[in-house]
Image (cartoon, rainbow, N blue to C red):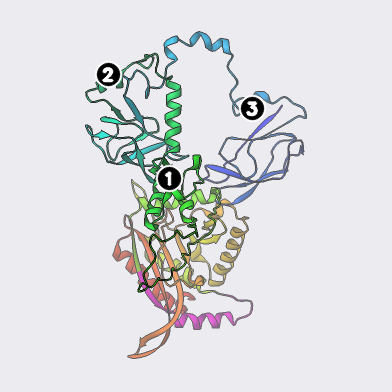
């Protein structure tokens, strides 16, 4: 009996997975425990084992593709087994027989589109145009005409904001603007009624409420043809300007603006867009003719011809690459966005004297088989400061503030596809060397995508260190459900005042981002004071 394998939920926050690699192909024999594929979750890439034996009959998600949890991943069964019944729910729906449909189709249900049906002669219903390939709705940024205005073909009716840009929308008809269907600032799906243009005095209500099956004039063009022609015209004439000989030139609004700024006559430019439409790159790459027109009159003897400087316009080729967002990148975006826009952040920055820390670290690292980093010292200081300021080690809920009596330290680690936060459990119980070993182990496995999901869960406080990149000071977004995150900058040598004298000292800036729902300014400031005391006197962390 064939077994359906669904996309597994490999972490508590996983909503979809991406197949990084298939280790088996259709037709291969599968044993229980065999690795079927490597699945990329929102946190790591993990090996996915088979719990069934048989032949791999079907692969539902190709390499590099993502799919929601519980969607069809694969089917395992006996060689040659019919699995068509299992695919019915995921493949293309079965074709409905024609005779089953015909009795339900009534004559009045075969209707022409509302936008062109039952309209008096000379009246045109303008619908929201599709101004980009991905546009599903548009917003009217501004109307340049008002009801009652006379409109000529080529007049700009409105500025339409798409999913990509705000574009001028021209009228392809002449008449009076009788009706505005979408007000400024409002949005509507593509093909919704945008405006009505026609002879003055036309009953607009009758036009908009007319039955879709009626026709104003039997000799008029078919509605389907008119809609297709209008749609094709709108797509092809997103921007048009008259040429010198009276013909119309297809050009985008941006191309027109660039040409105007550069003093380029669009009639001299060859368009590379759809239907010969002139686009931005055509204007930017335009090279004027080198032929110099003869002068109308010969210069007099007293006139001196000024040398013409060559015009060197930039020439290049536009290129781009589309990289599909990974599951990890999507999860980071969702997680940090939720934190930034729900938790009221505020930031506190202090400067720490690191002279004693540098000296202590040098002494510790002189011991055999011992290696301590400044980051380890910051983590230890944070863990000890959290014990003294439990308000910072909290989580906000709508019902209560949860005080965590344990300290699980999150450490932000940069990986190729974004940022992960391995968690050091019970960090306050670890020595400096134990902290350093834990960080090295977790960060290494995070970068090689071998870290386990439960090793990135449960943090109560997070530290993000960019000092190794030379960053002096920065702010971080709180890692939910924590109430705070510490941003650590680089240690720099600079003039400082000690005992009334200016000397060279080593300092480091740290910034605490706090959730104001749980951590007040005074609490955050007291935490930083304690943190600074530990870092400036490292011996207190060894007691």
Q: Is residue 136 left or right of residue 72?
A: left
Q: Magenta region: which residues? A: 349-371
Residue 317 in the image: state x and y as whole percent. Answer: 54, 56
Residue 401 in the image: state x and y as whole percent. Answer: 35, 52
Mark number for residue 87? 3
For residue 333, above or below residue 494 = above
Q: How crowded is mark 1: few (under 14 residues within 10 Å), some or many (20 or more)?
A: many
**Residue behind mark 1:** 251
SS type, badge 1: loop
Q: In which quarter of the image is residue 384?
A: bottom left
Spatial CA span between label 1 and label 2: 36 Å
The nearer-to-camera label among 3 and 2 is 2
Looking at marks 1 and 2 on the same chain, the residue that comes earlier in the sequence is marked by 2
Q: Nearer the viewer, residue 196 or 543?
A: 196
Q: Is residue 63 left or right of residue 162?
A: right
Q: In this view, does 323 lie to the left or right of 499?
A: right
Count of residue discs:
3
User: Magenta span has 353?
Assistant: yes
Are the two marked residues, 3 and 2, in contact with CB atoms closer than 8 angstroms? no
Q: Where, quadrant-wise, is the N terminus in this rendering?
A: top right
**Residue behind mark 2:** 206
Spatial CA span between label 1 and label 3: 48 Å
* Residue drawn at x 37%, y 19% as measured from the top left: 117
């Amino acid at each position: 009996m064939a077994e359906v394998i669904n996309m597994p939920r490999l972490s508590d926050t996983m909503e979809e997975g991406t197949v990084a690699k298939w280790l088996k192909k259709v037709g291969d024999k599968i044993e229980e425990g065999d690795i079927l594929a490597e699945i990329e979750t929102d946190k790591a890439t993990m090996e996915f084992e088979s719990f069934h034996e048989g032949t791999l009959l079907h692969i539902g998600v190709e390499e590099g593709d993502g799919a929601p949890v519980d969607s069809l991943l694969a089917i395992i069964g006996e060689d040659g087994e019919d699995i068509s019944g299992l695919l019915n729910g995921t493949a293309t729906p079965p074709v409905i027989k024609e005779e089953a449909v015909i009795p339900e189709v009534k004559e009045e249900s075969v209707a022409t589109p509302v936008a062109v049906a039952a309209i008096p002669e000379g009246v045109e219903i303008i619908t929201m145009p599709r101004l980009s390939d991905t546009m599903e709705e548009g917003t009217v940024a501004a109307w340049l005409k008002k009801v009652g205005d006379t409109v000529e073909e080529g007049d700009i009716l409105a500025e339409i904001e798409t999913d990509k840009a705000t574009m001028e929308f021209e009228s392809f008809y002449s008449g009076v603007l009788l009706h505005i269907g979408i007000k400024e600032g409002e949005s509507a799906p593509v093909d919704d009624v945008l405006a009505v243009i026609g002879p003055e005095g036309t009953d607009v209500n009758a036009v908009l409420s007319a039955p879709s099956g009626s026709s104003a004039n039997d000799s008029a063009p078919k509605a389907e043809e008119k809609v297709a022609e209008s749609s094709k015209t709108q797509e092809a004439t997103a921007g048009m300007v008259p040429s010198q000989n009276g013909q119309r030139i297809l050009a985008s609004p941006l191309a027109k603006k660039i040409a105007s700024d550069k003093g380029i006559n669009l009639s001299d430019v060859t368009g590379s867009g759809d239907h010969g439409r002139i686009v931005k790159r055509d204007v930017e790459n335009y090279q004027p003719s080198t032929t110099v027109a003869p002068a109308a009159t010969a210069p007099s003897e007293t006139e001196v011809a000024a040398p013409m400087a060559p015009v060197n316009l930039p020439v290049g080729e536009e290129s781009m690459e589309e990289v599909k967002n990974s599951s990890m990148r999507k999860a980071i975006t969702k997680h940090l966005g939720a934190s930034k826009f729900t938790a009221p952040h505020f930031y506190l920055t202090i400067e720490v004297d690191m002279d004693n820390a540098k000296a202590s670290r040098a002494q510790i690292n002189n011991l055999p088989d011992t290696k301590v980093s400044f980051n380890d010292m910051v983590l230890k200081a944070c863990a000890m400061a959290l014990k003294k300021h439990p308000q910072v080690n909290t989580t906000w809920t709508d019902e209560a503030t949860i005080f965590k009596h344990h300290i699980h330290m999150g450490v932000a680690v940069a990986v190729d596809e974004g940022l992960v936060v391995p968690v050091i459990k019970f960090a306050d119980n670890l020595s400096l060397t134990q902290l350093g070993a834990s960080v090295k182990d977790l960060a290494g496995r995070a970068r090689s995508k071998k870290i386990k999901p439960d090793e990135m869960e449960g943090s109560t406080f997070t530290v993000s260190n960019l000092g190794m990149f030379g960053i002096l000071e920065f702010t971080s977004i709180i890692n939910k459900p924590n109430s705070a995150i510490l941003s650590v900058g680089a240690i720099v040598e600079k003039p400082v005042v000690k005992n009334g004298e200016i000397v060279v000292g080593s300092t480091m800036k740290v910034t605490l981002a706090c959730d104001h729902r749980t951590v007040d300014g005074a609490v955050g400031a007291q935490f930083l004071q304690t943190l600074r005391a530990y870092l400036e006197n490292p011996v207190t962390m060894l007691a």
